[in-house]
Image (cartoon, rainbow, N blue to C red):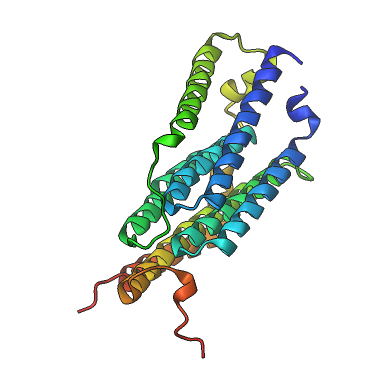
Amino acid sequence: MSLFFGRPLEHYLIIAAILFCLGLFTVMTRRNAVGMLMGVELMLNAANINLVAFSKWGAKPVIDGHIFVMFVIILAAAEAAVALAIILSIFRNFGDVDVDSKTLMKE
Amino acid sequence: MTIGDVLYNLAFYMFVVLTVLSAAVVAFSRNVLHSAFSLLFTFFGVAGLYVFADAQFLAAAQVLIYVGGVLVLILFAIMLTYTSTSPTHPGQASNLSSLSIGAGLLTIVVYFCVLSVFIPIPEGWSRITTDYSGTDVVAISKVLIGKYLLPFEVVSMLLLAALVGAAYLARRKG
């Protein structure tokens, strides 16, 4: 079968690289804290795509990549919950979630 | 290259375009709410990519956890932390033409999905639907309770800690 023109692994790696770069750009340029969290989720998804691709088309087809992805998804969800709780605290204390203006600890 | 292969590749590239385009909107949109809604499409696109890599359980888990959990949480946080000085731009009627083009494309995609039911399934597709002996879920379950039992238990404690921590951090003081 000539699926993916015979190069499935490269397709997935390129997609994951693009997604990772877009997530990194989001984290670096967004001023909204929730927007930065969305960039982090994009980067985690890119890593997951890489893991799944190598789990199927790597040196030998194993299932451990899928387990790794499951744990990454679990940790991403837990981290999003705690991060958003912190963001809510920041909003209550400062009135907005603009990360550029939070310079209290800077001297 | 049979018609089945062409359709398989076409469906894969459609998911690729969906994922990458939505991620670009997440990165470059100025309104954070637009970013959140296109993150939804990114998650669905990634779930589709998982299906093409024989990771059906992961695709289902991705949709359930990311779309049903993380994204809902993100949307709540955006709505709760919205201030009038957040950078947004009000909707204009000038983007009506692009909206109509988008709706037309979506219609074509839906027609394609509906009409693809009537295409006879060629040789290569049968293994996805009839061979259940070595599926994804069976292999994951064997390994999760066998080799990876310790991380499984540890991560359940971590989730408890995250739950308590998030509830404590977000409590209303006084």
**One can see residue B36 in this view:** yes
* Residue B55 in view, yes or no: no
Say which of B74 and A9 sits in front. B74
**Residue A65, position in %: x, y?**
65, 49
Q: How far across and how far down the image is residue B100, in percent?
A: 46, 26
Q: Residue placed at 57% from the left, 28% from the top?
A: B132
Q: Give residue B37's quadrant in the image.
A: top left
Residue at 51%, 39% (x, y): give it: B44
Left or right? Give the position of B99 relative to B124.
left
Q: Quadrant of residue B121?
A: top right
Nearest the viewer among A35 and A58 is A35
Which residue of the protein is positioned furthest toward the front in this rendering?
Answer: B94
Residue at horizontal 69 percent and vertical 50 percent from the top: A17
Residue B102, compared with residue A9, is above or below; it is above
Look at the image and tell me in which quarter the N terminus of chain B lies.
Answer: top right
Q: Position of residue A7 (x, y in %)?
A: 79, 34
Residue at the image position 48 percent from the left and 58 percent from the top: A35
